[in-house]
Structures are given as structure tokens and as C-alpha cells.
Image: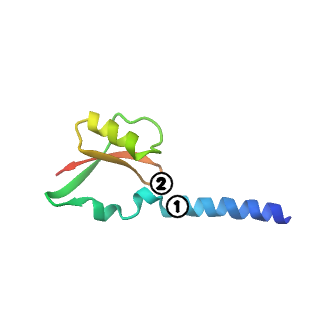
Amino acid sequence: MGSSARSYAAAILFVMLFISTGLPSEMGGGARKMVAEGRMCDSPSHKFKGPCMRDSNCKTVCEGEGFHDGDCQGFRRRCFCRKPC
């Protein structure tokens, strides 16, 4: 295996490792779900279509569904909406 092929394989492995361990929007997710008013509950969006790549797009769709907030979560990048329980 040539050095360029090894570099390419290493880059692919790094990307897969990064995705499997979580993207920045998922880090610390448990801490930000709690607010001063009480617990927040998550629910999958029923209207968001396709993979969720931007939290701002997810939030806009969730607000249209009557939720307070929304963000992209998980390995499959799904949009979850949030409201007080």
C-alpha cells in the first residue's frame, strides 16, 4: 500500500471516528436540556424532511410545529424539537 493510499485510508478512518463519537452540537447535550423553569422534553420533528445538518433549520421547523426550540441529534442526524415538559 503506497503512502498516498495510507494517508487516504487514515483520513477516511478519522472522519468515521469523528462522526461516530458525536458532532459538536451533540456534545454536552444533557446539560443544556435543563433550564431554570424545569425539565425540557424532546420529540422527533414530524415535518422536517431529510438529514438534519443545521440546527437553525431544525429550530425553524420546530417553531412552526409549536415547539420552543429544536436541534439536530444523533448519528442519523435527525431533527428533535424541544418544549417544557
Structural crowding at the residue carrying mark 1, measured as other residues with C-alpha within 10 Å and reported as few (<14), some (14–19) or many (≥20): few
Left or right: 59, with 22 as reference point: left
Identify which residue is drawn at 43% across, 35% down. Answer: 49
Disc 2 residue type (three-letter): Phe
Q: Is residue 59 above or below residue 5?
A: above
Residue 48 relative to residue 69: left or right? right
**Residue 45 at what x, y percent from top left?**
33, 40
**Left or right: 23 in relation to 85:** right
| Residue 57 point in image, percent of width and height | 39, 39
How far is the residue under mark 1 from the one under mark 2? 7 Å
Residues marked 1 and 2 touching at CB (< 8 Å): yes
Residue highlighted by disc 1: 20
* Position of residue 2 measured from the top left corner of the image (x, y, whole percent): 86, 64
Q: How many marks?
A: 2
Give residue 75's mark: 2
Q: Residue at x 55, y 62 (%)?
A: 18
Q: Give the percent coordinates (x, y) of residue 15.
A: 61, 59
Mark 2 lies on a secondary structure that is loop
Residue 63 sits in which quadrant?
A: top left
Viewer-proximal residue among 83 and 75: 83
Report helix, strand or loop for mark 1. Answer: helix
Q: Residues within 10 Å of mark 2 (few under 14, many from 20)?
A: few
In this orientation, does residue 4 appear?
Answer: yes
Q: Which mark is residue 66?
A: none
**Amino acid residing under circle 1:** Ser
Q: Tell me the residue at 23%/44% (across/down).
A: 68
Res 1 seen here: no
Of 59 and 73, the residue lying toward us: 59
Q: Give the residue drawn at x 43%, y 54%.
A: 74
